């Protein structure tokens, strides 16, 4: 109804003027809090942990008794705000969704730790099996700036100086801080082997697979058995994570375990010791190689591991003086599973055209790698690699974490167990054939509006702060009991 008095009309005009002065986020917030299901929406977002980009679903789930057809449990989104339900996006990258990345890192910790200590369906006897923590690196593609250490505080000192064929210094006498952006940059970009760097990334997954096959052959040689019959005596299990160095090159951190022929449930043979496994790892890493497809400009290149190889035996958590314990290794792997190339200064989204490379907020070194990847992707000889789709990862086409089938549990099993726990349902319901489950769900949207994103970020921050306070209280209680 139109305002009848001058005072009422002035009030409406003043309100409209105030709304025009508000930001889009503030106007959206006013709209959101006036929605009838606002409080329920807050509860839903809190249940997702403050997910930054939730997936909205609509539908229902009904659980019935298989014999009497009685409805035991029913849930529908009809009465939910907007007739939909948000679920986590499950993005592992912290740059995209910090709450989901933290949850994924926690799952990774349990996955790796259960393969070292047992639990989650893995026998506790794996603690007695030979276990190593191995780091395999990429070779050098050219000299790059590096941070100082206690033994070599300077970057690349050269007493006699010297220049490369392009007229640039061969050394660097500066002391770079860890946060110096020049770390990882080549001393001379014209000398740097960008083509070799990208092609190494494309073959890194194949190189790891070949390394595992070679490792089994070398273990068979140590045991004095026929290589083709190794599986009858022992089984090799692993879990590895990929990490980007500041120079933009991938290296792998891997947990390698030697089991009996039936996997974790069987003890390894007597010859299977940690020393024998370490010797085989070192010999396999230095001998294995794969070859890239032939290119008219560069020919066929051999792909090998770098000379930097770290091998450490994994000790029990009881050895508090050791840095390489079961839980420490699991936490180390879990830390890197939420990272991506953007932590090395790259981008975390696909590159769709060449112009996007020029506009990408990256340093010159990573831009040169992306350009090289894009150009190599246009060569017919490398068409099967689909390199242009992997320009944002600098040519690396593998998953951030992979494991052998028998190493431990799976992400799916961990998520299913958490879903049952959070729902409060009987863990055995539906597993004995006494119940029937009918589920009908469809995708109806994703993401937040401007105000929803602000509120979700606040909820995520509150939950994170709550976890920090709970951890502090736990440590205070621990100190009081000592």
Image (cartoon, grey):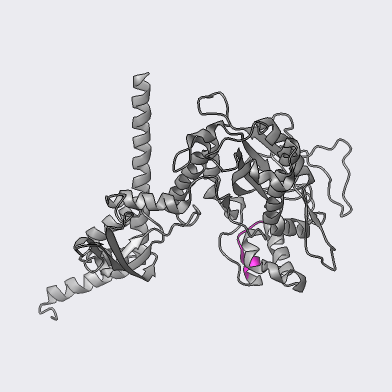
Above or below: residue 353 compared with residue 277: below
The residue under the point 81% across, 42% down is 171
Residue 371 image point, x, y percent: 71, 65
Residue furthest top as drawn: 482
Q: In this view, does 409 lie to the left or right of 440?
A: right
Residue 347: quarter of image: bottom right
Residue 278 image point, x, y percent: 69, 35
Q: Is residue 359 a member of the stretch shown in magenta?
A: yes
The residue under the point 86% across, 35% down is 159
Above or below: residue 383 compared with residue 228: below
Residue 85: quarter of image: bottom left
Above or below: residue 412 compared with residue 278: below
Residue 27 versus residue 188: which sits nearer the camera? 188
Residue 244 image point, x, y percent: 63, 50
* Residue 288 in sight from this viewpoint: yes
Q: Locate the C terminus by quadrant.
A: top left
Q: Is residue 124 a member of the stretch shown in magenta?
A: no
The residue under the point 27% across, 69% down is 82
Question: Where does the magenta region start and end?
Answer: 356-363
Q: In this view, does 153 lie to the left or right of 166?
A: left
Residue 284 image point, x, y percent: 75, 43
Q: Locate the N terminus by quadrant.
A: bottom left
Residue furthest left as drawn: 4
Q: In this view, does 45 lie to the left or right of 309?
A: left
The residue under the point 45% across, 55% down is 97
Residue 164 versus residue 282: which sits nearer the camera? 282
Residue 8 versus residue 254: which sits nearer the camera? 254
Residue 449: quarter of image: bottom left
Residue 158 versus residue 17: which sits nearer the camera? 158
* Residue 180 in sight from this viewpoint: no
Q: In this view, does 115 lie to the left or right of 273?
A: left
């Amino acid at each position: 109804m139109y305002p009848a008095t001058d005072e009422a009309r002035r009030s409406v005009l003043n309100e409209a003027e105030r709304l025009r002065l508000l930001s889009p986020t503030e106007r959206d917030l006013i709209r959101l809090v006036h929605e009838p299901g606002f409080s329920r929406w807050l509860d839903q977002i809190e249940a997702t942990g403050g997910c930054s980009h939730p997936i909205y679903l609509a539908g229902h789930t009904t659980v019935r008794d298989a014999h009497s057809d009685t409805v035991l449990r029913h849930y529908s989104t009809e009465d939910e705000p907007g007739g939909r339900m948000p679920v986590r996006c499950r993005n592992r990258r912290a740059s995209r969704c910090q709450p989901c990345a933290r949850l994924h890192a926690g799952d990774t910790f349990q996955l790796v730790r259960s393969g070292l200590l047992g639990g989650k369906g893995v026998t506790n006897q794996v603690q007695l099996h030979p276990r190593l923590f191995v780091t395999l690196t990429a070779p050098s593609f050219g000299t790059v700036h590096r941070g100082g250490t206690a033994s070599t505080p300077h970057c690349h000192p050269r007493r006699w100086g010297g220049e490369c064929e392009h007229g640039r210094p061969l050394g660097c006498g500066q002391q770079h801080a860890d946060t110096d952006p020049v770390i990882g940059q080549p001393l001379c970009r014209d000398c740097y082997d960008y083509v070799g760097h990208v092609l190494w990334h494309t073959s890194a997954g194949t190189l790891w697979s070949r390394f595992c096959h070679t490792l089994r052959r070398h273990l068979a040689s140590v045991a004095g058995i026929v290589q083709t019959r190794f599986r009858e005596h022992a089984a090799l299990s692993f879990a590895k994570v990929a990490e980007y160095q500041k120079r933009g090159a991938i290296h792998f951190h891997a947990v390698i375990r030697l089991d009996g022929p039936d996997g974790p449930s069987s003890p390894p043979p007597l010859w299977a010791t940690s020393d024998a496994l370490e010797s085989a790892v070192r010999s396999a890493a230095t001998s294995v190689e794969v070859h890239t497809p032939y290119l008219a400009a560069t020919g066929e290149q051999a792909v090998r591991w770098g000379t930097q190889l770290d091998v450490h035996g994994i000790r029990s958590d009881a050895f508090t003086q050791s840095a390489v314990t079961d839980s420490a290794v699991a936490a180390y792997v879990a830390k890197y599973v939420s990272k991506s190339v953007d932590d090395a200064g790259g981008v975390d989204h696909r590159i769709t055209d060449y112009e996007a490379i020029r506009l990408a907020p990256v340093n010159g070194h990573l831009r040169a790698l992306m350009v090289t990847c894009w150009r190599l992707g246009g060569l017919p000889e490398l068409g099967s690699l689909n390199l242009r789709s992997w320009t944002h990862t600098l040519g690396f086409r593998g998953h951030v974490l992979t494991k052998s089938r028998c190493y431990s549990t799976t992400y799916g099993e961990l998520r299913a167990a958490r879903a049952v726990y959070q729902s409060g349902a009987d863990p055995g319901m539906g597993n004995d054939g006494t119940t029937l489950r009918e589920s009908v769900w469809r995708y109806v949207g994703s993401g937040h509006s401007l105000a929803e994103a602000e509120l979700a970020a606040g909820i995520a921050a509150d939950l994170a702060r709550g976890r920090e306070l709970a951890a502090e209280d736990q440590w205070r209680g621990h100190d009081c009991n000592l």
